[in-house]
């Protein structure tokens, strides 16, 4: 397709770029080897990630340098020596800092390339895997062995996913990881072939490229069972215990599903290179829709995204549920952080009636007598008792009361910070104005407009 | 109990009143006999109802005079001769008019007594019953035979039920009929004993004074099965096919249930002689509650209550359901007629947001694609699609639109008149002001305040 060629011209690294990348990565590996020798360590430097697999996009030069230790090295020693080694390599490369994932690693900058130096075990099989990063070695090997020249197809898919905002397995994206895009291309042969098979993929839901369901049925079926709520189950070719797509959300899979169909119908370059998201005035939008925006602002606890964002999501849903019970209609939810953490609720109104209908139990029996005894005004409709209750009118009062009475399900690390919550009605501070607009206009999630 | 004696003094007909009632009814029967003889008809005059059973309240002197024809007389002839006879008796008594139930009868006024002259068959058993009124003869006989001097207990119960607004089996009351009160007293022996057994009655639910469940199990169980949604099943001692309490609503049974318990706790004369229902300003009440009143006014079709009121109820519930789907919260419903028919809805608000959330199906599959194709703005939450729709804001517009699109379940005889509906917001014409107050204050149904 003409269009895909045009896209590739923009995203495929040129020969010149490739030469630079190759030279720089070779230098990095050499520096690593020298430092290993100098320290007399047993590690082997290994390039992994998209540069190693030759599936990187032009301009995207993150180098993943793994230091692979023999399996016999105890984990404690691996961490210690790995970090020391990382530091001395980082020192040689230039600027560096220590970062933390499952264990500490070094992040350095060298000739404009970001270099992650990560200690791991030199595993040969999934049975050897001891730390989360070990598998990367196997992934890189497997992709290199199976990609069979379809590297550019991976590039097209990656760029397409970036364009529709569904690329990345981070918790704030919950989209497609690089490895997942590679597996999808290896399975379907090409970008267009994947797009043409998207309905089938959605329905069949399970990909098993190495036949683990036959080779290791017990383990592989356990994976399928555990992941049955996921939109896709891609059994990791190098490890039957893992769903490569486990971080993928239904939302991002859905975006891909519809955009793939749309692209098939009318392929346009904008899918790959979208014009910058439109922004606008959230206050005008509120007036136009007739809805209201409640924003909860509170101090952001010191937590990594993987912990914080799911807790924010859980809390936002807690507010939704409790407020719905109180008679407010919640149209949509949003959460995140900039400096402070925030939860946004789009609601139908900010004032409710002073009196709420209070449905009771059937009147015959103990529960009926109890309700009758406990309430002021009581009447019967059908077999059931009803009463009224006088309630707070403003949603701000209602939220404060719910929080004071502990009647909202919150993420556990948010219980303290939320005590300092500010509740804003139809107003957000300047730094959240764009977020508010994207939320209310649905630009943030919209798959069609 | 002192209190009950006090009540009886007020409601039991005095000797003087009894003498007058007896004399007047004797005169009426004699006049009937004369007219029958004059016309050479085969009918026998029979007194039925509370005067015949001596369970009437002081001042309540409705005379039910039945003209009982032999079973051999064809129904057509019974109706014709019955009406002729009724007219000539009515003529002798004074003012009269022809009224209609299952068949025409005569309603006359004689010395201040209202006299219903009703043709029927002279049945000896339920197997003979041909018209709905025939059973009255059997009821009267059965009560006279079984009441065993507990007539005053019936009077107490009737007055109590009147006081709490639960007496009468008419469709606009749906409470306890006179016959049902007599059976309850015959079963429980006394007014207080019934009150003490009210929980047991509510739980056991079935009364079978003549043991029909054993004597005619097939027929009696069919009655129980058919009536299983009723609050009480009292198998008619004279007819196993009938539930004497079939007209009783859960609401009125519930009122009796709670008032009985309350009376046991603290007997007060007000149960029998309530102070006139308080009335007040419905507009002030609306302001106080923060709710809104929507009144639908439309021409009353020429229908008897038995047909009209259930259709009004059904339509009111139709409005409730449709408006709830449109995002309005309906607190309570009321219906009835004065000159015009009306339906009142107490709602949370009369304006809604311009945009309504429109939940769609799961996105994988035909229904998802369809929803996606048909809607403008579409996004995904979890597995489901969502969209927004722009809607009418005013409840008046919404109701008019729903009616125009035929999206409200209405009683079939109301479909035409409702085309002329007037929709009033927080305002009713003067003749409905009291009704509006009673509705909004719950005085109309309240069992506790």
Image (spheres, coloured by chain):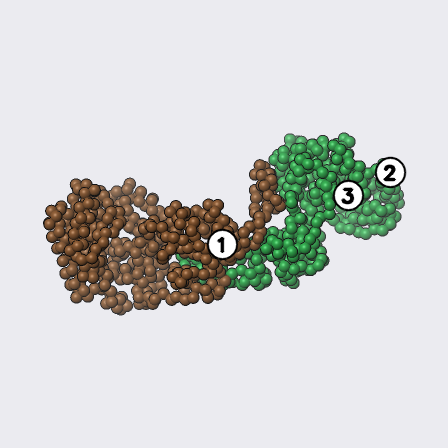
Chain colours: A green, B brown
What element does badge 3 sit on? strand
The Cα atoms of the two marked residues, 1 and 3, are separated by: 69 Å
The answer to whether marks 1 and 3 mark residues whose Cβ atoms lie closer than 8 Å is no
Cα gap from disc 2 to disc 1, whole angstroms = 70 Å
SS class, disc 2: helix
The answer to whether any part of residue A420 appears in the image is yes
Q: Which residue is mark 2?
A: A16
- Marks 3/2 in contact by CB < 8 Å: the verdict is no
Residue in the foreground of this view, choosing between B165 and B375: B375
Residue B396 disc label:
1
Foreground mark, 1 or 3?
1
Q: Dot 2 falls on which chain?
A: A
SS at circle 1: helix
Tell me the CA gap for discs 3 and 2: 32 Å
Horizontal and vertical percent position of residue B229: 36, 48
User: Which residue does the image show at 78% across and 36% down from the upper left?
Assistant: A6
- Left or right of A274 on screen, residue A331: left
Which corner quadrant of the image does residue A12 belong to? top right
Q: Nearer the viewer, mark 2 or mark 1?
A: 1
Q: Point out the image quarter for the N terminus of chain A.
A: top right
Neighbour tally class for label 2: few under 14, some 14-19, many 20 plus, Cα within 10 Å: few
Instruction: Tell me if mark 1 has few (under 14), some (14-19) or many (20+) residues whose alpha carbon lies within 10 angstroms of its own.
Output: some
Residue drawn at the location 26% of the way across and 66% of the way down:
B7
Locate residue B427 relative to residue B393 in the image: left or right.
left
Q: For the point 49% across and 54% down, which residue is it?
A: B396
């Amino acid at each position: 397709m003409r269009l895909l060629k045009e896209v590739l011209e923009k995203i495929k690294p040129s020969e010149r770029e490739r030469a630079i990348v190759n030279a720089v990565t070779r230098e990095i590996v050499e520096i690593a080897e020298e430092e290993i020798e100098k320290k007399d360590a047993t590690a082997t430097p290994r390039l992994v990630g998209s540069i190693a697999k030759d599936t990187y996009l032009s301009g995207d030069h993150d180098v993943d340098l793994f230091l692979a230790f023999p399996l016999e090295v105890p984990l404690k020693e691996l961490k210690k020596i790995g970090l020391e080694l990382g530091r001395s390599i980082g020192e040689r490369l230039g600027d560096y800092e220590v970062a933390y994932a499952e264990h500490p690693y070094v992040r350095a900058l060298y000739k404009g390339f970001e270099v992650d130096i990560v200690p791991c075990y030199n595993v040969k099989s999934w049975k050897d895997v001891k730390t989360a990063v070990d598998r990367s070695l196997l992934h890189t090997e497997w992709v290199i062995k199976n990609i069979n020249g379809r590297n550019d197809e991976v590039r097209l898919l990656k760029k397409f996913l970036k364009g529709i905002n569904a690329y990345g397995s981070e918790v704030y994206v919950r989209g497609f990881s690089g490895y997942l895009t590679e597996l999808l291309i290896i399975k379907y042969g090409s970008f267009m072939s994947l797009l043409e098979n998207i309905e089938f993929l959605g329905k069949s839901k399970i990909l098993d490229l190495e036949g683990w369901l036959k080779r290791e049925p017990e383990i592989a079926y356990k994976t399928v069972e555990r992941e049955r709520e996921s939109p896709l189950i891609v059994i990791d070719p190098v490890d039957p215990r893992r769903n490569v797509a486990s971080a993928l959300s239904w939302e991002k899979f859905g975006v891909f599903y519809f955009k793939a169909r749309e692209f098939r119908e009318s392929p346009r370059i904008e899918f790959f290179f979208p014009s910058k998201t439109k922004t606008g005035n959230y206050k005008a939008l509120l007036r136009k829709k007739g809805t209201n925006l409640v924003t909860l602002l509170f101090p952001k606890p010191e937590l990594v995204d993987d912990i914080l964002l799911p807790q924010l999501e859980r809390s936002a849903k807690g507010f939704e549920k409790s407020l719905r019970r109180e008679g407010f209609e919640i149209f949509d939810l949003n959460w995140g952080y900039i400096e402070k953490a925030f939860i946004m609720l789009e609601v139908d109104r900010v004032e409710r009636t002073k009196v709420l209908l209070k449905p009771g139990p059937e009147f015959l029996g103990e529960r009926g007598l109890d309700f009758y005894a406990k309430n002021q005004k009581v009447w019967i409709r059908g077999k059931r008792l009803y009463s009224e209750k006088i309630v707070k009118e403003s949603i701000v009062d209602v939220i404060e009361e719910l929080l004071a009475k502990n009647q909202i399900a919150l993420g556990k690390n948010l219980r303290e910070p939320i005590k300092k919550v500010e509740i804003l009605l139809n107003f957000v501070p300047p730094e959240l104005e764009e977020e508010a607009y994207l939320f209310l206009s649905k630009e943030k999630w919209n798959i069609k407009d």
